[in-house]
Amino acid sequence: MSSLPSNPSPAFVRRNPHIYGNVAFKQPVLSGPVALEILESAKESKRIRQPKPVKLNATETRALEWLRGRYPGATIHVHAKIYVLALGVKYTPEFTAHVDGRETAWEVKGKHIWDDAVVKIKMAARVFNDTKWVLIWEDGGWMEQVVES
């Protein structure tokens, strides 16, 4: 068997705890307030991985404002649900909300819509037929199409 690398990266050490044990990777020696800040942050272990905040593009931002104006009493969630359509196939609509007592999911598209997006929203409408699926796009004003199962 070959010898261990003399200069392993932190990622390599984390991926190989059976070789290196459960020891934290040692950072290079630093001095000053930066070193203290690094050491303090290393002491805090995060148990729950938090997702990064959702960033909407310009079209999605305009669509969200339009939906909020159209359904003022509804709480519209952004990228909040992931629908599992098949083994390894997941779909996340842009917006979901309860409207008129029914779960509604909106997919926002720009000028072009790719084939895989069409297939996924059609499949989602068929698999989750208790949810109302709506495709919306901008063409002088907001247009919408209910996707039938």
Image (cartoon, helix red, strand yellow):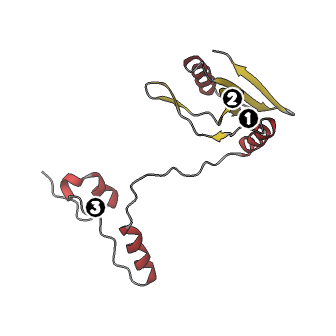
Residue 127 in the figure: left or right of residue 36: right
Q: Are marks 3 and 2 in contact (CB under 8 Å)?
A: no
* Quadrant that contains the C terminus: top right
Sequence-first disc among 3 and 2:
3
Residue that mark 3 sits on: 8
Q: Are marks 2 and 1 in contact (CB under 8 Å)?
A: yes
Q: Secondary structure at mark 1?
A: loop
| Residue kind at label 1, given as amino acid type | Gly
Q: Quadrant of residue 67?
A: top right
Sequence-first disc among 3 and 1:
3
| Depth check, front residue: 62 or 109 | 62
Q: Quadrant of residue 46?
A: bottom left
Q: Secondary structure at mark 3?
A: loop
Residue that mark 1 sits on: 110
For the point 39% across and 66% down, which residue is it? 44
Residue at the right extreme? Answer: 140
Q: CA distance from mark 3 to mark 1?
A: 46 Å
Residue 34 location, x and y as percent?
A: 45, 78
| Residue kind at label 2, given as amino acid type | Ile
For the point 76% across and 31% down, which residue is it? 137
Residue 113 location, x and y as percent?
A: 68, 29
For the point 15% across and 53% down, which residue is it? 2
Residue that mark 2 sits on: 113
For the point 71% across and 33% down, which residue is it? 109
Q: CA distance from mark 2 to mark 1?
A: 7 Å
| Residue kind at label 3, given as amino acid type | Pro
| Depth check, front residue: 50 or 13 | 50
* Dot 3 crowding, Cα within 10 Å, few <14, some 14–19, many 20+: few
* Dot 2 crowding, Cα within 10 Å, few <14, some 14–19, many 20+: few
